[in-house]
Amino acid sequence: MDYFTQMFGKLKELKETTILILMAIVVISLFLAYTSKKKKTNTKILVYGGLCIAMSFVLSYIRLYRWPQGGSITPGSMLPMFIFAYIFGVKAGIIAGIAYGFLQFIQDPYVVHWAQVLLDYPIAFAAMGLAGLDRKHFPISVVLGGFGRFLAHFISGFIFFGVYAPEGMNPIWYSFTVNFLLIGVETAICLVISLIPQFKVAIDKLKSSAVA
């Protein structure tokens, strides 16, 4: 019971500002979805983007495991962002990722240097948009997006957080290990979900509907 309390406990820390932003994103997305008579591509991008950002953000505050120095493993919180990039492409995925990164920063900022902020927030989350590089094979999209985010956190880790490495351990290896365990495991969770036949069929139908 204590584990489930800890898993969902982070949701209680959501700031009022963040909740209002999330509510506004969802309301605007739903408003656009139901009022747009012509389902133009730009409108669809805004609708899907807003809903995917909101879903990813909420899932990111359900923690399966939390690393003591920061970072956590969630139940596939990156998946909605991968789906969005897979459907609408790299450019849209990167823009949505940047917006998502700033939302994460507003809610839970961790600052040691301006370059670290850029790497760990807008750049890391924008890199998930690399999932849009392959729009035919969703599992490959997941790997590409996960690697993009891993790379940004990895660089930030050994430059700015190498001091946390155990004595005698190379900061680069420390950053690789920590981020591989966190981002790697989370990407693996998304990958496993993407390989479920029923899920794959649902994503392909969603893509066909969105780009029609």
Image: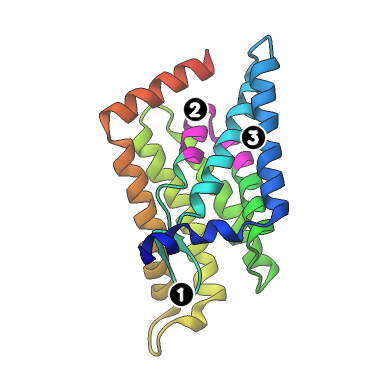
Instruction: Please check the rendered image and state whether residue 82 is part of the magenta-colored stretch, yes or no.
Output: yes
Q: Give the structural element (helix, strand or loop) at label 3.
A: helix
**Residue type at the position of mark 3:** Val
**Residue type at the position of mark 1:** Pro
Residue topped by disc 2 = 87
Numbered tag placed on residue 68 in the rendering: 1
Residue 125, compared with residue 194, is above or below; it is: below
- Chief SS of the magenta region: helix
Q: Which of marks 1 and 2 is in front?
A: 1
Determine crowd level at label 1: few under 14, some 14-19, many 20+ residues with C-alpha closer than 10 A: few
Residue topped by disc 3 = 26
Q: Which of 64 and 165 is in front in this view?
A: 64
Counting from the top left corner in percent of width and height, residue 92 is at 60, 34
Counting from the top left corner in percent of width and height, residue 31 is at 69, 24
Q: How far, Cα to Cα, is label 1 from label 2?
A: 35 Å
Q: How far, Cα to Cα, is label 3 from label 2?
A: 19 Å
